Image: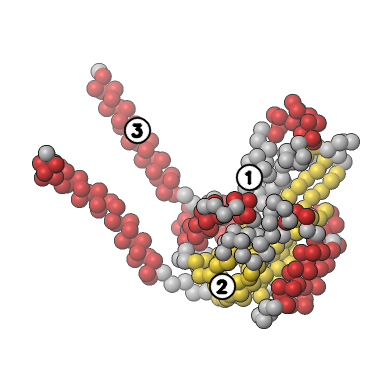
Amino acid sequence: MLKKLINHENFKSDTIYVSVIILIPIIVSLIIYTNIDIEEEKIKTVIIQPNIDPYNEKFNRSNDQNLRYLESILNDVKNRNSLVILPETYFSDGSLISSLNYSTIIEGLKIIRERYDTEILTGIELYDVFNDSSKVKKYSNRLENNRWLDLFNASIFISEDIDIYKKSKLVVGIEKMPYKNFLEPLLGSLLIDFGGLSYSRGYQDYRTVFKSNTGTKVAPIICYESIYGEYVSEYVRNGANLLAIITNDGWWNNTEGHKQHLSYARLRSIETRKNIVRSANTGISAVINYRGEILKTIGYEQEGLINKNVGMNDKITFYTKYGDYIFRLCLFFIIIISAFYLANLLKVKK
């Protein structure tokens, strides 16, 4: 019976048709992969993985401790004039936004920058406490005594100037309270008593690109944001020539989670044809080229640094311009096919 099925003319033609559909994209991808060559300028980078336990140690360290650790690491780095990348919420003790420029964090980072001739991109917790109700945003957290709290998982860039980016793709249930406008009036002050877990993080509506006088235009992508292709492409449309992913993958422990998160980064490099520098508190820190190839890594639960020259380019890909067009095309064809199917079904019933 199987022999008859294989010999059947329709089976053979269908097999050829399906094989062609599968093979053509593979062949085209291989041709693109082997022929792509993008002209790039190089920048020295230092990617640091401190490997601090996020459950027991990370959020008990002071900003001064983290500054001393950074300086001790850079003392051993021979290269100067480098871009230094530190992980998400590296300065977890936080800083008040209104006094950030005069804080011990910024003063310390400025000294390190001048001493080691570097530019520094690092994660930081920022916050603002205020009484003025006219400043209240959708994400503001109500405190007692008519006060409000804005919290931000942010990154800062220390160069000639200081720039800030606030993480905007927030993890639901951890950084963002779902249905907050609905639940807060119902639960009221109970939200304050949940050990801070209910505090939502703030965000911004545009993708900031950190720019320096050396030509670096780096995208500060914070953790969860890196899984969204179209979101990351907004940085490139805003001028980014290098992608920096800062993350804290230790929450997963030694599971597949941190490995899958790294795999998403490879997709982002292919979509945008940008090199990626990735700093994880712990997880897998890495350098990834615009082909999606991992060039260098620091493994899970390892402390260390990557010292490597990385390329920057201004290429704008089709994906960067038009986003998830494959998904949209598939959705369009599904709608058309479904419409034809329903039309034929109605004809048969008549």
Q: Residues within 10 Å of mark 1 (few under 14, many from 20)?
A: some
Residue occupying the point 57% across, 54% down:
254
Q: How is the image coloured?
A: secondary structure
Question: What is the residue that sits farthest to the top in this orientation?
Answer: 350
Residue occupying the point 33% across, 58% down:
26
The answer to whether residue 159 is left or right of residue 345 is: right
Estimate the spatial distance between the alpha carbons at disc 3 and disc 1, rounded to whole Å: 34 Å
Figure check: 261 above or below 107:
above
Figure check: 88 above or below 41:
above
Residue position for label 2: 310
Q: Which mark is residue 171?
A: 1
Q: Quadrant of residue 117?
A: bottom right
From the viewer's side, name the closer residue of 137 and 178.
Answer: 178
Of labels 1 and 2, earlier in sequence is: 1
From the viewer's side, name the closer residue of 74 and 135.
Answer: 74
Of labels 2 and 3, earlier in sequence is: 2
Residue position for label 3: 338
Task: Residue type at mark 2: give it.
Answer: Val
Please indicate, yes or no, whether residue 82 appears anywhere in the rendered image: yes
